[in-house]
Image (cartoon, rainbow, N blue to C red):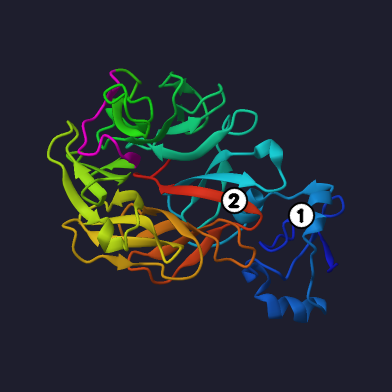
Amino acid sequence: MGPVFKAPFYGVAGLYTGESNTLRLSASAGDWKLFGGLNAFIGAYGKVPVFGKKAIAYAKNVITYEKLLAQKGGTETNEKILFHSRKEYDPENYNGLYIMNTNGSNIEKIPNSSYPAPVLDYASWSPDGTKITFVSNKEGNEEIYTTNIDGSDIKRLTNNPKRDLYPNWSPDGQEILFVSNKRTKYPQYTGDGIWIMNADGTNQKELNTPYPYGQHDFASWSPDGKKIIYSVQGSNDGCSICIINPDGTGPSVLVNRSSLGGRDGYFPHWSPDGSRVIFETTINGNKEIYVVNSDGIGLKNLTNNPALDVHPSWSRDGTQIVFISNRGELEYNDIYLMNADGTNPKKLFGDYFHNSNPVWSPVQIK
């Protein structure tokens, strides 16, 4: 084991205590800027600290990653990133929702969003940033809920024996898109269809699509609310990323499966200015993040590396993309940030955490 320091000497690499009020540091991963870099740390303290993974499970006291990252420096704004996280060694916080600054600092857990009432791995912001819609099976089935960002006023919006997934608020805050396999319009099919409801859960209806037999994986809104973009598996004309009007009319193809090597696309999101769309797909057995212009031209692989890269979401100004990747040393699903052209990827949060579906806030959060 490496040297031991009395609290509050925090470093992102040293996450867990082995004794009361102490912190052991690791050279295996992390950000050493608080110590002037790893070499400066070695020079000051005489040797490289080491840390065994097994010690995590037996630590008597835990300095949480949230508190640790709250110590990090960097430019902060009132914009936030909402994400789902599962802690490898902390079952009491299993499947929770968190909010952090866009530089990875000041992580806060949303109350009432963890075990024994687990949130499943997708949530989205209301347009005014005051509420969140999410999926939970806390009542025995995947249903859609809303809550204030402080965890209060939880409301159940769907209530049926089928699964309801991937809710997304309309830009005007009046409606919520989601996918469900209840298929009242097309009961002969078992795959998920696209549904829309009022923001209070009333007036739920399934949309007509050109592919009622297909598996509709995800749907989201255009910035002006006039179009819906969605991913589908099993379309007879090969559409992978498709567009439709909110009333189910005007279908069109944005990305054809043939342009993706016969593979499907997932999780499409329009850029804030409506000029581009990001999504994930599998190329040569590997998950990558792609961008395409809103007219279907200019398809480009943004990540292009052997790691898993999934769940992309635009920054509020459209200049950056937050996403999930396991390219880190420990191969957990960490949260990364890159420029909109795929350059300068950097890790915001991870190590011993499984994270998913980061979503940038649509407004400044007070």
Instruction: Kindly identify which residue carries mark 1.
Output: 16
Q: Is residue 209 magenta?
A: yes
Q: Viewer-nearest of labels 2 and 1?
A: 2
Measuring from the top left, give residue 331's x and y in whole percent: 61, 62
**Amino acid tagged 2:** His
**Is residue 127 among what the camera can see?**
yes
Q: Quadrant of the C terminus?
A: top left
Task: Note whether 338 is above or below 46 in the view shown.
Answer: above
Residue farthest along the left direction in this orientation: 250
Secondary structure beneath dot 2 equals strand
Q: Which of 51 and 317 is in front in this view?
A: 51
Label 2 Cα neighbours within 10 Å, binned few <14 / some 14-19 / many ≥20: many
> From mark 2 to mark 1, how far is it between C-alphas?
17 Å
Q: What stretch is highlighted in magenta?
A: 203-217
Seen in the image, is 194 located left or right of residue 282?
Answer: left
**Amino acid tagged 1:** Tyr
Q: Is residue 114 magenta?
A: no
Q: Which of 104 and 6 is in front in this view?
A: 104
**Is residue 319 among what the camera can see?**
no
Measuring from the top left, give residue 76's x and y in whole percent: 47, 56
Q: What main secondary structure does the magenta stretch of the protein show? A: loop
Instruction: Kindly identify which residue carries mark 2.
Output: 354
Measuring from the top left, give residue 109's x and y in whole percent: 58, 40
Q: Which residue is drawn at 19% across and 40% down?
A: 244
Q: Nearer the viewer, residue 149 or 136?
A: 136
Q: Which residue is drawn at 61% across and 45% down?
A: 86
